[in-house]
Amino acid sequence: MTIKGSPSTVETASVSSPSVSQGNADSMLHILRLVSPNQPVGGFSYSRGLEWAVHSNIVTDEKSCSSWILGLLESSYASLDGALYWRMANALLDGDETAFRKLNDWLTASRESRELELEDRRMSESLLTILEQLGVQKAADFLSVERPSYPAAFAIAAHHWNIPAREALRGLMWSVVEGQVMAAIRLIPLGHVAGQRMLIAAVPAIEAAVQKSCTLNDDEIGNVAPFMAMASAWHETQYSRLFRS
């Protein structure tokens, strides 16, 4: 499936116009709100396999943790969630509801463990419920979908508040990385300064991941992180857990 759209068609704005400048400022504040840890969607409850990796002494310090998080961003999130998010954002801009739902189905069918599937579903349902209560009709309609994905719910929110697709994708990836870093601070444990160093190091990695997501062909989309899938599955039966499974 190929969805029309490109960075130039998704983000066209003239900074010389005062109204557009205000629109840019508004969208920036909305993206900060959507990626805030205070957004009550429960992302803080999940470790995406990181807890098992720490328990098994695979992730033991700042260096190994940064490699784990940024490696998954590049090899898994950018090539699956990010790439399909980019297409969903374009589908919403085109008003193509059929394409949007097919892309959501593609993403939910790609979850590699029961834990990852439940995380995605719970977070998406939480965000869609919030959006419905805020009067976002498209979110109310999408709640009827059997398996809504969190990136799809996030795309609906970004579209509603006119956040440019590439900026929204950056924010979505930032929230994933930040959530993993915050989990690592609790699990390894790491100090908050080490956490800040990892987040600073993540900035160019996120930009590269966004670029990758926006330029992949349809036949290049897919998750290539089998170790994360196994870690997530093993986490379900781990004896002691801080995070949900």
Image (cartoon, rainbow, N blue to C red):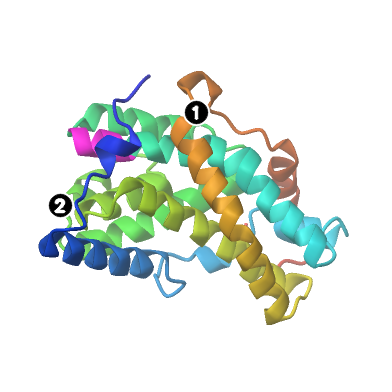
Q: Position of residue 211 (x, y in %)?
A: 49, 40
Left or right of residue 27, residue 16 in this image:
left
Q: Which residues are magenta?
A: 89-94
| Mark carried by residue 216 | 1
First-in-chain label (2 vs 1): 2
Q: Which quadrant: the C terminus?
A: bottom right
In this orientation, does residue 221 appear?
A: yes
Q: How many marks?
A: 2
Q: Residue furthest right?
A: 57
| Mark carried by residue 137 | 2
Left or right of residue 159, residue 232 in this image:
right
Q: Nearer the viewer, residue 231 or 34?
A: 34
Q: CA distance from mark 2 to mark 1?
A: 31 Å
Does dot 2 land on a helix, a strand or a loop? helix
Q: Residues within 10 Å of mark 1 (few under 14, many from 20)?
A: some
The disc labelled 1 sits on which kind of residue?
Answer: Leu
